Amino acid sequence: MSATDYQTQGRLAVIRLQNPPVNGLGHPLRKGIVDGLDTANADAGVDAIILIGASGTFSGGADIREFNTPAMFAEPSLATVIDAIEASPKPVIAAIDGACMGGGLELALGCHYRIAKADAQIALPEVKLGLLPGAGGTQRLPRVIGLEAALNLIVSGSIVPAKQFKGTDLFDAMAGDDLLADAAAFAETVIGKTATLIRDIKVQHPEAEGFLMVAKNTVAAMSGHFPAPVKCVEAVAASVGKFDKGIATERKLFGELVNTPESKALRHAFFGERAASKITDVPKDTPTRQIEKVAVIGAGTMGGGITMNFLNAGIPVRLLEMKQEALDRGIATIRKNYEGRVKKGKLTEEKLEQRMALIHPTLSYDDLGDTDLVIEAVFEDMDVKRQVFEKLDAVMKPGAILASNTSTLDLNKIASFTQRPEDVVGLHFFSPANVMRLLEVVRGDKTADDVLVTVMKLGKTIRKLCVVAGVCDGFIGNRMVNKYVAQALAMLQEGALPQQVDKAVESIGFAMGPFRMSDLAGNDVGWYIRKRHYEEYPDMPRMPIADKLCEMGRFGQKTGAGWYKYVPGNRKPQPDPEVEQMILDTCQELGIERRTLSDDEIRDRLVLSLVNEGARILEDGIAQRASDIDMVYLNGYGFPLHLGGPMLYADSMGLFNVERRMRQFAALPGADAKFWEPAELVKTLAADGKTFN
Ligand code: NAI
């Protein structure tokens, strides 16, 4: 199929854009439009030209399949296409429905006239990729909808319905149900007339200069580590002057943004999310199983949150507990959670009741037989998991999927408790499970392809970002975070204090440093695991400072004290001299001479501890690709979006420098040299001058 279809209809030429799914403006489509224009202008029987999407959508903008390929820069560029339209002696009318976004909107703005359906989706979302509209959007949009409205749209990247701009110069007419017929009727009215080009309209604003200055300051204060929103304001500001000069400014600013690390990180996140849904060794046409009813075992912290995901998507849930009280408590917590949303005006009472009605509480496994998927979220104990999975194996219908939310236990072992290990998969949700977007899909040795594909699809339905992980202790995220926490503790022992370590990473955008994170999650969790490990592996390095903290009963926020102290009712951490003294005393007991650590050292040691384990995870085949690791960290661990994830951080640093830095850390006084031995993958990539991503 050609990317455009050209037909004449009486005196009109109709150029249909047909590049599914959203008429992305790839090279063949751009060329097709110019060819169509040339044909129409050479045909004496044609008096006007209509540009319209072939299947209910105008254009979603750039063709993302062309990103980072030479085709993206091949002529005709979008700017060339727009120049050709503006120069067309015969009027060109954009007939708009569906998506009209990014380059798609810029294309429409280049036309002589625009007619749109009321519900067409209008947006310039480039800012979301750390960019700005680079084909005249920042110059033409203010000329038709005004400075303020254009600025809001461009800086936010939000999508609004076309009807919001009815009556502005953005649209010359609004269409009814039959877009092409209405566009054709409109075209007849403009034949032979000279259209005013948008470039020739003057931007109207009584106080442009003052408004733009305030806008720039406001946007700068809100955009944190990202430069694009401010550049968007600068580009829009240039629309107040001469058009050609404004276009030059837009182009210059666009060029500056494309090469910023922040834009690279945003684009990495955009493509990384899409890549994560692909499972390399599973055939594309693998059929999925039908999931209409779900069961959740355990109505505790995780079970309740997991249940809410399905209720939100309209999927009924059988919720099973051991005792009535636990069931009642779990359901009351879910209701309370929804009531909170009602209070904030984010949910109606009616919806709340509809969702609650989808819960079918039960104490009996016999009630689960007709469900298509069961997710177990009971205590983290292999014996308990065994009891649960043996029962599930007995009651679940053939073909049902049996999932575990375990965060540390061996999924293959759990699968072995059943006669159908091929139906068993891990669904590792993150807490709070109704909020956190990440879902690690754990693939057991025997997990069937169709089970995997089915849960990936279901994950999308409940609006999760699914990342496939292999079976190992901690899967992707927690396996790495264990190294990160170990490194944070090591630095306390060498000379740092919790508040310094936290600040060093929070200042570059981490949602929370390791000690605040630990206070929130509960310091006792790691302590119990450590005590078990000390017994199981007597040679294991000890963590005396962390152990002492727990011996002092400082389990974190829940006990009012941890690495920090907390005033009751306030989550703000306050550095505590008692903790500092304990750290100093412990170092003295151990005969350690403390030294000053720089924030740079702290940051690099924390991030590179993630990177080294991430590399091993790739070597072991636990993650499919480096970007999957980055998606886990961006969506589950508060890693700053503008840095793109630990593996992209390492790539930006250069793996040669990463390896060198690791060797420097290994040589520090008191360092654990084994910890800092660079992973084989780091070494080979560094030697070849390559990157993870
Ligand atoms: P929890 O203690 O809050 O809830 C467990 C619930 O399971 C309790 O309500 C208990 O009554 C119920 N239960 C125990 N045995 C049962 C059985 N045989 N049949 C039916 N119900 C039973 O624990 P939480 O935190 O919700 O953890 C559950 C699972 O989720 C664990 O495997 C844990 O490792 C995993 N997980 C926990 C995360 C967290 O942040 N809390 C994060 C990700 C996974």
Image (cartoon, rainbow, N blue to C red):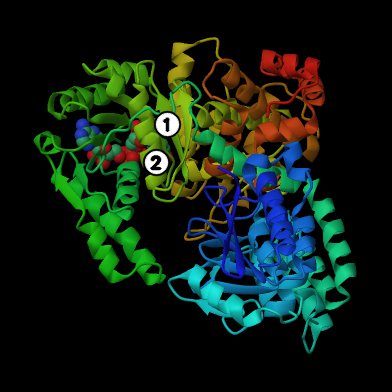
Locate ligand 1 by image quadrant: top left
Residue 606 visible at all:
no
Q: Is residue 139 above or below residue 683?
A: below
Q: Are marks 2 and 1 in contact (CB under 8 Å)?
A: yes
Which of 490 and 91 lies nearest the eye of the viewer? 91
Q: Is residue 186 left or right of residue 402?
A: right
Residue plotted at (30% across, 42% down)? 303
Q: Is residue 679 left or right of residue 424?
A: right
Residue 459 - label = 2
Q: Residue furthest bottom?
A: 206
Q: Is residue 335 above or below residue 30?
A: below
Mark 1 = which residue?
441
Q: Residues within 10 Å of mark 2 (few under 14, many from 20)?
A: many
Residue 497 quadrant: top right
Number of numbered discs overlaid on the protein picture:
2
Which badge, 2 or 1, is on the more N-terminal residue? 1
Ligand 1 within 8 Å, label 1 CB: no
Q: Give percent across and percent down for residue 114.
A: 62, 73
Residue type indicated by callout 1: Val
Which of 463 and 475 lies nearest the eye of the viewer? 463
Q: CA distance from mark 2 to mark 1?
A: 9 Å
Q: Is residue 26 above or below residue 146?
A: above
Of marks 2 and 1, the one in the foreground: 2
The secondary element bearing badge 1 is classed as strand
Residue 108 - label = none
Residue plotted at (64% across, 65% down)? 156
Q: Give percent across and percent down for residue 448.
A: 34, 21
Residue plotted at (32% across, 51% down)? 308
Residue 407 quadrant: top left
Q: Give percent across and percent down for residue 282.
A: 44, 23
Residue 459 visible at all:
yes
Quadrant where the C terminus is found in the figure: top right
